[in-house]
Image (tube, rainbow, N blue to C red):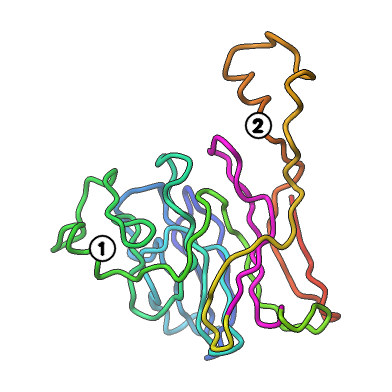
Amino acid sequence: MTCPDGSQHPYRTLASGPDGFLYVTVGSQCNNCVETNPEAATVLRVRPDGSARSVYARGLRNTLGFAFSPVDGTLYGFDHGSDDRGDDVPPEELNAIRPNRHYGWPFCWGDRQVDMKQQNDPEGSTRADFCPTTEAPALMTTAHSAPVGMVFYGGSQFPAEYRHSAFVAMRGSWNRGQPSGYKVVRVCFDAAGKPQSIEDFVTGWLMPAAPAHLRQPGAGPAAEQAKAARPAQFGRLSGLAVAADGSLLIAED
């Protein structure tokens, strides 16, 4: 199986769905363009032998972390918002990914907000008319956190309230004044399998900035001084898995 060229988002995630098909995420080739390849910024669905390949859902800029709910089989995925919108826009989105739906990118962000930096309109429509017809996120969280791995918990090692929660690896921001991400979060679901909230589960990959009195005065230009005042990180998360004994395995690079 050959996927579209990666360009800005070359990495792919695949998983077997409850229907026996493979689901493959294909990120956008750019930050905020109108794609020329119809398979870019999508989730693809294909038989394990490579046949019956089709676009399952569109408008997903880069959904690296996704998993199927053990309660009702719904496909949930975390999408990365566009860069160059500032520290807090757009939020990262948890989407319930359903067939033949469009999730907004590159014309809309967050809760179906029109992206004013995108000067193009969707074919046959305008952004103002199109965005209300797209799928709204199930939940949103801090911009630029970069969710890259997602797994539902089905083990018995954790307390009972964690069963059927989803854990998400936040790789961490590279373009935010104060860093976001660099942690594992828990997505809490209700008894019916609907996502309700996002909370920190494991933190600590961000270290506090050095106190001002310990920084070398006048060392370099203002930009370097500002960088020195930011928290430091000693790892970026890259994936999650639930082991056979019910423990949560966390990878970082």
In the image, residue 14 lies at what x, y percent? 57, 72
In the image, residue 171 lies at what x, y percent? 64, 52
Residue located 65% across and 77% down the image: 165
Side of 120 relative to 139 (left or right): left
Task: Name the residue that disc number 2 marks.
Answer: 230
Instruction: Confirm whether the magenta stretch covers residue 180.
Output: yes
Residue 10 appears in view: yes
Give whichever of 162, 23 is nearer the camera.
162
Instruction: Examine the image and state in which quarter residue 66 appears.
Output: bottom right
Side of 137 relative to 221 (left or right): left
Q: Earlier in the sequence, mark 1 or mark 2?
A: 1
Task: Name the residue that disc number 1 marks.
Answer: 131
The label number, if any, that marks residue 92 in the structure image = none
Magenta span of residues: 162-189
Q: Secondary structure at mark 1?
A: helix
Instruction: Confirm whether the magenta stretch covers residue 5.
Output: no
Residue 49 appears in view: no
Q: Secondary structure at mark 2?
A: loop
Label 2: few (<14), some or many (≥20) within 10 Å? some
Task: Give the residue at the far right of this rendering.
Answer: 245
Instruction: Examine the image and state in which quarter residue 57 appears.
Output: bottom left
Residue located 70% across and 82% down the image: 163
In the image, is residue 186 above or below residue 190? above
Give whichever of 226, 247 is nearer the camera.
226
Instruction: Examine the image and state in which quarter residue 97 appears.
Output: bottom left
In the image, residue 122 lies at what x, y percent? 21, 59
Residue mark closest to the camera, 1 vs 2: 2
Residue located 21% across and 64% down the image: 130
Amino acid type at mark 2:
Arg
In the image, is residue 141 above or below residue 119? below
Amino acid type at mark 1:
Cys
